[in-house]
Image (cartoon, coloured by chain):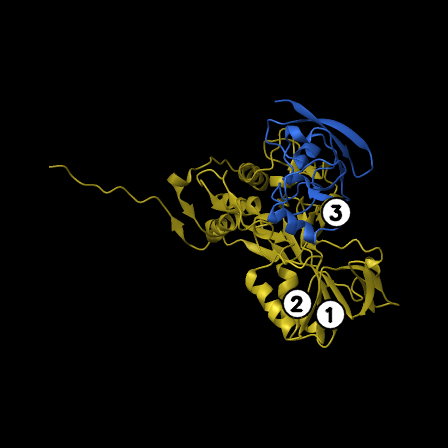
Amino acid sequence: MKDIKITITDRQGVKHEVDAPTDMNMNLMEIVRSYELAPEGTIGICGGMAMCASCQCYVLSDHQLPEMSYDEDLMLSEAYNVKENSRLGCQIFIKEELDGLEVELAPEV
Amino acid sequence: MIKTDILIIGAGPTGLFAVFEAGLLKLKCHLIDALPQAGGQCSEIYPKKPIYDIPGFPEVLAGDLVTNLMKQIEPFQPGFTLGERADTIEKLDDGSFIVTTEKGTKHHAPIVAIAGGLGSFEPRKPPITNISDFEDNGVEYIIRDPEFYRNKNVIISGGGDSALDWSIFLTDVAKSVTLVHRRNEFRGALDSVEKVQELKNLGKIELITPAEVVGLVGENNLEEVVIKQGAEVFNRECDHFIPLFGLSPKLGPIADWGLEIEKNAIKVDNTLDYQTNIPGIYAIGDVNTYPGKLKLILCGFHEATLMCQSAYQRIFPDKRYVMKYTTVGGVEGFDGSKKEAPKAVIKSID
């Protein structure tokens, strides 16, 4: 198991290239929190249950992501600032095939 | 003025359990919460989700945990100020505090325990640039009194239970009800969705989907909303626009109480009693931070327990106290009830 590289653009527009472990069952929201790229309390509010959309991000690279679950899809149907490439970070689990993933955090609501 | 021994801000699991631990020490508690019901996030965000790390419960639904906690603290008759947000705090000369809610309800206590989780729940506001200009002039995020909408043209947006339920309810009150949602599918309970479908077929609700309200127009009061449906953009006359997109927690006014804030949480001086930089004010549960902090319900319970011991010492500095097990001392409620271990049956052996 190796770490993968992910490029995360924070809410101020600053790009960060970070290492993300593939063997710790972590998701993208948790990676953002572990590198403190968004203030605590503004991301992952529901803890990762696809119930708040505070971890919404825009996927900029053309990686093949796992299909959206029913819960994620419905949460995004009620979230703000949603675009075609919106996903919930908490539903994107770090896997080797996501090496090089590029995402941008959606604005805080 | 409501008087109590420990004023708890936040009626989530940590705040509720603090009532129990305080009760064992014969301290009275009163809780303030911005939500209309107790339980905090457990009730508001995930009542139907199972929790697996409450000691002694292999699996418990968040909503059931709250029900159990309410039952556990019942003998201690806590007071509740629900649906009101704690806004200001004032320290009196004797070291006690007065906490006032945004509705003006005053609470007086020698000890304040903030168990506010991620903050008070506020409605999520749609990102429409001039929306604040129309707040209370045609835009409302919460329906307080349905009568307010009698014979008015109302546009609701959202796709969850509250959007569906209010759309249904207001058809009997308002002149017209229009529901705008970004999808054709709704996230609410199935019978609510079916009811809206039925009302739509009867022509009592107009559904505009998949669409979004993207602008607001009006001189002083709201007159029209701008709706974007696919490539088409059109205006629709209305008296009220009610966006119902759920609630999101914000630390809010507590951030201005002179408490040390770090990472959107209240820094506590130590992990002995979770007192803040203001003596007499404690922070317990998800709202606090200290080295090694974990935002877990079980940690909140522990913090609530130690907080109560410290609060007791603060209220009664001269009293000596030794912690008693409930297996030994039982639970003596303020309501006269007493729970005790059954006495052993004595039986002679011939």
x and y percent of residue B323 in the render? Answer: 46, 36
| Image depth: mark 3 or mark 2 in front | 3
The N terminus of chain B appears in which quarter of the rendering? bottom right
Q: Is residue B348 left or right of residue B78?
A: left
Q: For numbered disc 2, what is the local secondary structure?
A: helix
- Residue A6, image quadrant: top right
Rate crowding at label 1 as few (under 14), some (14 to 19) or many (20 or more) other CA atoms within 10 Å.
many
Q: For numbered disc 1, what is the local secondary structure?
A: strand
Task: Choose between B5 and B200: the one closer to the eye.
Answer: B200
Chain letter for the blue part: A
Query: Which residue was labeled with disc 2?
Result: B167
Rate crowding at label 3 as few (under 14), some (14 to 19) or many (20 or more) other CA atoms within 10 Å.
few
Query: Which residue was labeled with disc 3?
Result: A84
- Residue B287, image quadrant: top right
Q: For numbered disc 3, what is the local secondary structure?
A: loop
Chain letter for the yellow part: B
Residues behind callouts 3 and 2 on a single chain: no
User: Is B175 located above or below residue A105 in the figure?
Assistant: below
How far is disc 1 from disc 2 in space, using C-alphas? 9 Å
Query: Which residue was labeled with disc 1?
Result: B154
Q: Amino acid at mark 2?
A: Ser
Label at residue B13: none
The C terminus of chain B appears in which quarter of the rendering? top left
